[in-house]
C-alpha cells in the first residue's frame, strides 16, 4: 500500500497498533454509496496532474488525536490523499472532496447502467441481416442516434466503474470485474452494429442523391501482408478505453489535461476522463492542423533550420502529406466518411459530438497502418502534396471528374498511375522509415520497372535497410554491397541461397557400405550450387543485352536461366557450362573405390544424378536424394503462380518482367561470392569496369556507379535539406 502505514493509539495502553484498512472497508453497497470506500493502487495512472485540496471543516464534533487518513488514491493512482477521512458510514473513510466526487461518479454510472440494462431487457439491437433490409434513411438515422446513446451509456458506466476500482477500492471487487468484462463485450457488439448502420445509411444517402456515386467508398485492400487483416472491433474498443493510441512524431509531444472545475468537490471524474482523452486526441493530431507543430518537429527531431524558405516548403509538404493521407483514410472508411459529409475541416470533425472515441481509435489504427494497406494511400498523399507545393497545379494531377472535396481539401478517388517522381520516393521513405524485409510492399506502389529500380536505388543509398537474405555473414563477408550495386545498375535481386560446405566435405565422402568389387567401399559425392533470383527489364534494353552477354561469356562462373513473362508457356532461355547448357543446382553420384584417407581421396567417377536442375530453380521439382525419400523443391515461379507467395517480392507486381536465375558454376560456395561476381559483370556491362575482377578495380567502378545514380535520384534536393555526400569504397584501400 502506498504511503505510510496508518497508526492509532489504543486508549489506556500507551501502545500503538497498525490499522488494518480492510477492517474499515466494505464491498460496494448499491443501496448506500456512503458505506463503500477504500482504494486499490494501480500502475495505470490517468494523464491528469495531481491536485492537493483543503477540507473546509469536518463532520465530527470531536477531533480525533490521530484521524484516519483518506483512503482514496489521487489521480496518479499511486499517491494516497493526505487529508483526514471525515466522511463515510459507519466510520469515516474519505475526505469531503473525495466523498463528493465519489457520490457524483457513482450516481452517474449507475444511471448509465440502468439505460444499458433497459436495452438488454427491452428494446433489442438490430442484427446485420435486419440492417441490410432497411430502406428508409430517416429511420436508419434515428436508429443510429439511439444506438449512440446506448453506446455512450456503456462508455460512461465502464469508465465510472474503472475509476471506482482504480481509486476507491482497497481490493478489486469481483462484481465490478464481471460487470466491466460484460460491458466490454456489449461495447464490441454495439460498435459493430453502429458501424453496419452507418454504412447502410451512407448507401441509402447515395441512392437517394443522384450524382453522389463518388461518395461510395472503395473497400479496404485485402491480403496485403500481415498488417492488413481487418481490424477487430475488440482492438478498436480496447484502443479507445481508457487511453487512445495516437500518432507519435517525436518524444517531445506534451500530453494535455482536461479543464478543471474551480471546486474540486464538484468535479465529474467520468467527464474529466473523457475530456482528457479528447484533449489528448486534439493534441495528438495537431500535426494535421498546426504548421508550427510541423516546424517544431523538423527543428527538434531532424535538426533543420526552419527559417530557411526551402525548409518551410518541406514542412508544408509534410503537413499536406499527413492531411491528404488522413483524407484518404476517411474517404475509404465508411463510418468515418459518413460522419465527415457535413464537416468542413479536420477540427470540425474531431470536435463533433458524434465523433466517438471508437472513431478516434479506428482512425488512429488506420493511420498507423501506413506500411500496411495504407501504403498505397500514403504514396498518393505524397504525390498530392508535391503537386500542391507547386502553386496552381493542384488540378493537374488527374481527371477533374475523379477529384472530390473531403474536409476542406481535394483528393482523387483513384490511385495515381504515372511514374513516381524521385522526390516522392525520398519523402515517402523519410517519413515511413521502413524496416528490413518489407520491400515487397513497396512493389505494390510501382507502376513500371523504372519505379521498382528507383525504389531499390533509394534503398541502395541507405534509405531502406538491406534484406536479411543478403546480410548474413560468412567468414566476415556478406552480399549487401553487391546487391546494392546490382540495384543501382538496374538488376533486381530478390533472393540468394547457398549451402556452403566445409572444405573437407567437398569431394567424395566415404560410406560404411561395402562395394561389389573386392576391397572397395561406396563413395558419395554431392554438389549444391549457390543461386540468386531476380528480374530484368522485360522490354528491349541496351544494358540488359550487355549484362546477359557478360554472363554468357563466363560459363566458368555463371549458369543462367531467364524467363520472360510475355513468352508463351514455360519457355526459358538457358546457357552455361553443362551438357545441356546449364549445370544443375543440385546433383549427386556414388561409385566404388578402395578406402583412403581424406588427404588422398579418390577422384569421383560415374554418372551424375540430377536432384534439382537449373530450370527447377524457377519451376520446382520432387527430387530423390541419396538415402532419403523424394522431397519437394518448390520453384520461385511455382510459388508466385500458386497463390502461396505471401511476403514475396514480386507478389504485388503489376507489369511484366524478365525473371532470371543465376547459379554459381563452382559448387558448394557461399552466395556472397556469386553476388560479387554478378555485380562485377553488371559494372562491366554498364561501362564502369573492365578486365578480370580485382578488389580495387571493383571499388573504383562501384564508386562511379554510386555517384552517377545518386546524382540522378537526388538532383531535386535543395542544399538546405542537408544535401548528400557519397562515401567511396576505394578510400578503404588507402
Image: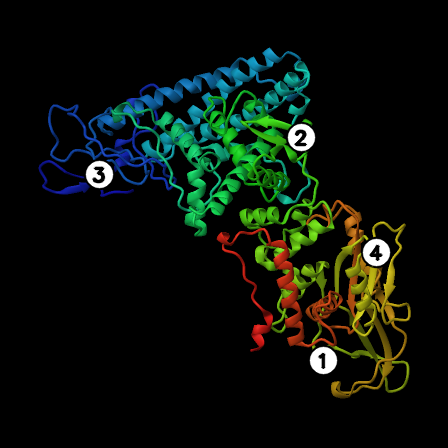
Viewer-proximal residue among 258 and 312: 312
Residue 410 at x, y percent in the picture: 59, 30
Element carrying mark 3 = loop
For the residue pair 585 and 116, the one nearer the viewer reads as 585
Residue 19 numbered tag? 3
Q: Toward the viewer: 222 or 236?
A: 222
Q: Dot 2 lies on which element?
A: loop
Between disc 4 and disc 1, whose residue precedes? 1
Q: CA distance from mark 1 to mark 2?
A: 61 Å
Look at discs 1 and 2 and give the one toward the viewer.
Answer: 2
Q: Is residue 485 left or right of residue 164?
A: right
Compute the Cα span from label 3 to label 2: 64 Å
Specify the quadrant that holds the N terminus.
top left
Which residue is the site of mark 2?
218
Rendered view: 634 above or below 206: below
Residue 407 screen position, x and y as percent: 54, 27
Query: Is the residue marked by circle 2 packed among few (<14), some (14-19), or many (20+) residues within 10 Å?
Result: few
**From mark 4 to mark 1, how far is it between C-alphas?**
36 Å
Amino acid at each position: 500500500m502506498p504511503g505510510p502505514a496508518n497508526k492509532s493509539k489504543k486508549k489506556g495502553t500507551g501502545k500503538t497498533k497498525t490499522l488494518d484498512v480492510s477492517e474499515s472497508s466494505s464491498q460496494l453497497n448499491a443501496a448506500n454509496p456512503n458505506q463503500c470506500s477504500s482504494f486499490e493502487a494501480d500502475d495505470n495512472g490517468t494523464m491528469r496532474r495531481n491536485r492537493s485540496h483543503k477540507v473546509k471543516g469536518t463532520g465530527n464534533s470531536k477531533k480525533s488525536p490521530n484521524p484516519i487518513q483518506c483512503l482514496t488514491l489521487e489521480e496518479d493512482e499511486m499517491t494516497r490523499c493526505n487529508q483526514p477521512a471525515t466522511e463515510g458510514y459507519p466510520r469515516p473513510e474519505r475526505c469531503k472532496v473525495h466523498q463528493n466526487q465519489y457520490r457524483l461518479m457513482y450516481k452517474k454510472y449507475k444511471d448509465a447502467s440502468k439505460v444499458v440494462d433497459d436495452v438488454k431487457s427491452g428494446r433489442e439491437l438490430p442484427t446485420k441481416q435486419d440492417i441490410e433490409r432497411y430502406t428508409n434513411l430517416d429511420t436508419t438515422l434515428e436508429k443510429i442516434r439511439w444506438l449512440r446513446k446506448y453506446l455512450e451509456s456503456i462508455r460512461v458506466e465502464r469508465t465510472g466503474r474503472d475509476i471506482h476500482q482504480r481509486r476507491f477500492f482497497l481490493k478489486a471487487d469481483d462484481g465490478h470485474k464481471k460487470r466491466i468484462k460484460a460491458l466490454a463485450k456489449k461495447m464490441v457488439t454495439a460498435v459493430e452494429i453502429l458501424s453496419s448502420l452507418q454504412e447502410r445509411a451512407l448507401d441509402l444517402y447515395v441512392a437517394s442523391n443522384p450524382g453522389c456515386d463518388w461518395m461510395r467508398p472503395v473497400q479496404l485492400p485485402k491480403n496485403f501482408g500481415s498488417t492488413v487483416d481487418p481490424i477487430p472491433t475488440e482492438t478498436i474498443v480496447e484502443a479507445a478505453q481508457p487511453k487512445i493510441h495516437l500518432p507519435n512524431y517525436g518524444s517531445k509531444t506534451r500530453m494535455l489535461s482536461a479543464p478543471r472545475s474551480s471546486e474540486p468537490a464538484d468535479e465529474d471524474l467520468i467527464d474529466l476522463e473523457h475530456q482528457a482523452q479528447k484533449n489528448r486526441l486534439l493534441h495528438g493530431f495537431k500535426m494535421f492542423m498546426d504548421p508550427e507543430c510541423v516546424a517544431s518537429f523538423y527543428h527538434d527531431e531532424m535538426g533543420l533550420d526552419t527559417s530557411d524558405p526551402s525548409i518551410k516548403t518541406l514542412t508544408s509538404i509534410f503537413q499536406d502529406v499527413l492531411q491528404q493521407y488522413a483524407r484518404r483514410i476517411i474517404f475509404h472508411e465508411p463510418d468515418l466518411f459518413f460522419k465527415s459529409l457535413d464537416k468542413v475541416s479536420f477540427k470540425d470533425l474531431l470536435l463533433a459530438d458524434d465523433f466517438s472515441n471508437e472513431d478516434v481509435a479506428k482512425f488512429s489504427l488506420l493511420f498507423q497502418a501506413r506500411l500496411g494497406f495504407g501504403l498505397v494511400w500514403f504514396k498518393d498523399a505524397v504525390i498530392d502534396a508535391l503537386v500542391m507545393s507547386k502553386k496552381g497545379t493542384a488540378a493537374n494531377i488527374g481527371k477533374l471528374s475523379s477529384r472530390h472535396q473531403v474536409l476542406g481539401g481535394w483528393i482523387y478517388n483513384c490511385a495515381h498511375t504515372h511514374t513516381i517522381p524521385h522526390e516522392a520516393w525520398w519523402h515517402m521513405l523519410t517519413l515511413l522509415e521502413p524496416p528490413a524485409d518489407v520491400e515487397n510492399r513497396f512493389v505494390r506502389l510501382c507502376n513500371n520497372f523504372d519505379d521498382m529500380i528507383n525504389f531499390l536505388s533509394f534503398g541502395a543509398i541507405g534509405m531502406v535497410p538491406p534484406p536479411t537474405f543478403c546480410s548474413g555473414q560468412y567468414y566476415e563477408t556478406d552480399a549487401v554491397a553487391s546487391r546494392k550495386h546490382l540495384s543501382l545498375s538496374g538488376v533486381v535481386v530478390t533472393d540468394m541461397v547457398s549451402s556452403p560446405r566445409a572444405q573437407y566435405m567437398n569431394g567424395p565422402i566415404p560410406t560404411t557400405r561395402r562395394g561389389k568389387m573386392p576391397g572397395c567401399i561406396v563413395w558419395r559425392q554431392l554438389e549444391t550450387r549457390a543461386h540468386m533470383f531476380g528480374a530484368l527489364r522485360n522490354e528491349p534494353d541496351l544494358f540488359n543485352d550487355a549484362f546477359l552477354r557478360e554472363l554468357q561469356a563466363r560459363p566458368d562462373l555463371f549458369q543462367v536461366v531467364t524467363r520472360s513473362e510475355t513468352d508463351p508457356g514455360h519457355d526459358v532461355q538457358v546457357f552455361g557450362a553443362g551438357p545441356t547448357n546449364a549445370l544443375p543446382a543440385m546433383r549427386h553420384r556414388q561409385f566404388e573405390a578402395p578406402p583412403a584417407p581424406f588427404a588422398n581421396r579418390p577422384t569421383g567417377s560415374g554418372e551424375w544424378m540430377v536432384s534439382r536442375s537449373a530450370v527447377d530453380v524457377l519451376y520446382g521439382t520432387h527430387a530423390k536424394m541419396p538415402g532419403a525419400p523424394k522431397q519437394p523443391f518448390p520453384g520461385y515461379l511455382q510459388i508466385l503462380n500458386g497463390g502461396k507467395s505471401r511476403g514475396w517480392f514480386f507478389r504485388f507486381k503489376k507489369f511484366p518482367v524478365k525473371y532470371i536465375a543465376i547459379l554459381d558454376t563452382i559448387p558448394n560456395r557461399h552466395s556472397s561470392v556469386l553476388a560479387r561476381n554478378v555485380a562485377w559483370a553488371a559494372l562491366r556491362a554498364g561501362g564502369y569496369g573492365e578486365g578480370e575482377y580485382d578488389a580495387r578495380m571493383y571499388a573504383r567502378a562501384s564508386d562511379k556507379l554510386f555517384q552517377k545514380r545518386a546524382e540522378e535520384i537526388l538532383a531535386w534536393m535543395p542544399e538546405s535539406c542537408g544535401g548528400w555526400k557519397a562515401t567511396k569504397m576505394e578510400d578503404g584501400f588507402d
